[in-house]
Image (spheres, helix red, strand yellow):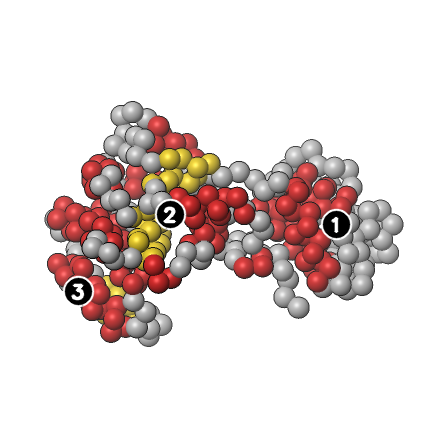
Amino acid sequence: MRNPFEYGGVVSGEAFCNREKQTSDLVRAMENGEKLFVFSERRYGKTSLVRAALGKLPRKGYVCAYVDLWPTDSEATFVTTVAKAITESMSTSVGKVLETAKKFFGSLSPSVTMDEEGKPALTFGLGKHARVGPALDEVLVTPARIAAKGGPRVVVVFDEFQQILEYGNDHVERKLRSVIQNHRHVSYLFLGSRKHLIQKMVLDRNRPLYRAGGHYPLGPIAEKHWQPFVRQRFADADKGIDQEHIHEVCELTQGHPFYTQHVCHVLWELCEPKAGCEHRNAPGGGEGAVGPGKLCLHDVVGVSGPFPEAVLEGVGGGGLRSEGVCR
C-alpha cells in the first residue's frame, strides 16, 4: 500500500488535508473575478490549495492558466512564460496548441520543437534583448480577449509572484496594474512565498500594485483537522494511532502542513499493520531504536526546539525519539 502522507510536492486528492474554508474562499474569489494576493511562508501548501480550488471550477466555463514565475529572470522570460501558460491552458494536442499560440501570440513567433526527452514543446521567438514592451502588452490583454463577448471566464494564477522583483525594474508591476484593473471577467491570484515582499508590494503606497487586490494570508492547519485526517489514514492501512500521539505531532510541527505530513509519513512507515503507536512500552522501543536510517524526530522536521520529552517512542518494532541525538 502506498504511504498516504505526501510532502515535498503538490499534494492533491485524498492526500490533501482539509483547507475546506480556504478552498471555498478561493473558489468564490475566482467566480467573482477578484484579484487576490495569497501569501505565506514556504511549504504551507499554497500551490496545492490553489490547484484544489481550480479543480472545483467547471471546465467548460473556465480557462485556467497557471503561471510558475520561479524560473523567470526578466521581462522577456515573463512574457514567454505567461504566453505558454495561457496557450497550454486552452489546448491539449500539439496541433491545437500551435494554432492557439499563433492566434493570440502571433508576434512572438510560436513554434513547436522537440525537448531533450524527444517530446514536443511550445516555444516562442522573443529574444532576451528584444523590445518587450509590445509583447508584454499583448500577453497581458489576452486574458480579457479570451473572456470577451460571452467567452469563458478566465483565471490566471501567478505562482512565486515576488520573482518579478528580480527583473531590475517595475515595468511588469506598473503594466499589470494598468491592465488588470479593467478586466471584469478575469480573476487573478498572486501567490507568494516571501511574505514580507508580497505584503510590501500590496500595502506600500509607493508600489504600483498598492491595493490592487485583496490579500489572503495562509496559516497552519488546526489540530482539529489533522486529528481525523491522520487517524483515518492509519486506519485504512490497519494501523493504529491515538489522539494523544496526533496531538504531540501537531504540538511539535505547530500544524505546519509540510512538517506534519513528513512526520506522519515516517510514523506510518515505522508502524506495522495491526499495530499501533505506543507511547513508552512498544516492543523494540528501546534506547535510540528508530528504525531504518536512525531517523530522529529533529532530523525528520529539520528544525530544533523545545519538543515534548517523548514524542512517539516505539512505533511498531522501532522507536521514534524526540531527542536531538540518537545513540
User: Residue, x 17% and y 59% (percent of image)?
Assistant: 105
Q: For the residues carrying marks 3 and 2, which lies nearer the camera in this image?
A: 2
Q: Return the residue at label 2.
A: 30
Relative to 198, say whether 10 is above or below: below
Q: Which residue is mark 1?
A: 320
Residue 36 falls left or right of residue 308: left
Label drawn at residue 102? 3
Secondary-structure class at tag 1: loop
Kindly report which numbered mark, 3 or 1, lies closer to the viewer in this rendering. 3
The one nearer the camera, 302 or 244, is: 244
Circle 2 packing at 10 Å, graded few (<14), some (14-19), many (20+), is many
Residue under the image location 30 percent in, 54 percent down: 153
Residue 215 in view (yes/no) = yes
Q: Earlier in the sequence, mark 1 or mark 2?
A: 2
- Which residue occupies 69% across, 33% down? 306
Q: Give the spatial CA distance, label 3 vs label 1.
A: 57 Å
In this view, the residue in front, 218 or 153, is: 153
Q: Earlier in the sequence, mark 3 or mark 2?
A: 2
x, y percentage for residue 320?
Answer: 75, 49
Say above or below: 244 vs 214: below
Distance from the alpha carbon under mark 3 to that under mark 2: 27 Å
Q: Position of residue 241 (x, y in %)?
A: 76, 52
